[in-house]
Image (cartoon, rainbow, N blue to C red):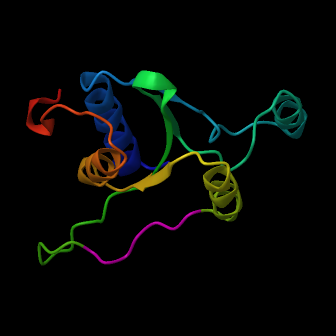
Amino acid sequence: MNRSEDALQKSLVAWLRFNGLFVTHVPNTARRSPREGKRYRDMGMVAGYPDLIVHGQGGRTVLIEVKAPPARLKSGALSKARPRLSDDQEAILPQLAALGIPVLVARSIDDVEAALRGLGVPLRDKGRAA
């Protein structure tokens, strides 16, 4: 995860919590020794699992993979280049979606807000988020 992705994730977590949702982070990106990696895999860690698990009212769960927002070019315009999903993410996200779990790829709070509203999740006005 890079710094712009970190900043987006921190803002997103604050916004989701402001909206009354329970959010936890899955720290899969840490570098581990092969022995430690095997230990974590044996305990259930799955490469490519989304960054955030979000729980809402009625047991509703949504998974969010956070990707860096578009970079700003010297001209001031936003780059059309987008960070891509890893091979592990490309493999696991469709498996989760096939189980009926909504999985979002977020490049902005606006992405998440639109998707959550589309899923019928009640939200506050994002302008009041911390």
**Residue, x 60% and y 33% (percent of image)?**
27
On-image quarter of the C terminus: top left
**Left or right, 29 with reference to 61:** right
Q: Residue at x 67, y 49 (%)?
A: 99
Residue 88 in which image quadrant: bottom right
89 displayed left or right of 82: right
In the image, residue 107 above or below residue 26: below
Residue ID at (84%, 27%): 43
- Residue 76 part of the magenta-drawn span: no
Determine which quarter of the picture holds residue 14: top left
Residue 4 vs 77, above or below: the answer is above
The image shows residue 95 at horizontal and vertical percentages of 70, 55
Q: Is residue 8 above or below residue 36?
A: below
Q: Position of residue 128 (x, y in %)?
A: 10, 30
Q: Which residues are magenta?
A: 79-85
Residue 80, magenta (yes or no) = yes
Please give the count of numbered marks on the rendered protein: 0
Residue at 60 percent across and 48 percent down: it is 100
Compared across the picture, whether 94 is left or right of 69 comes to right
Could you tell whether 126 is left or right of 115 in the image? left
x and y percentages locating residue 10 in the rendered image = 34, 34
- List x then y, in percent, for residue 37: 82, 36
Q: Judge by depth and name the residue closer to the eye, 27 or 92.
A: 92
Q: Quadrant of residue 17?
A: top left
Camera-side residue of 48 and 58: 58
Q: Is residue 59 above or below residue 52?
A: above
Q: What kind of secondary structure does the magenta stretch mostly adopt?
A: loop
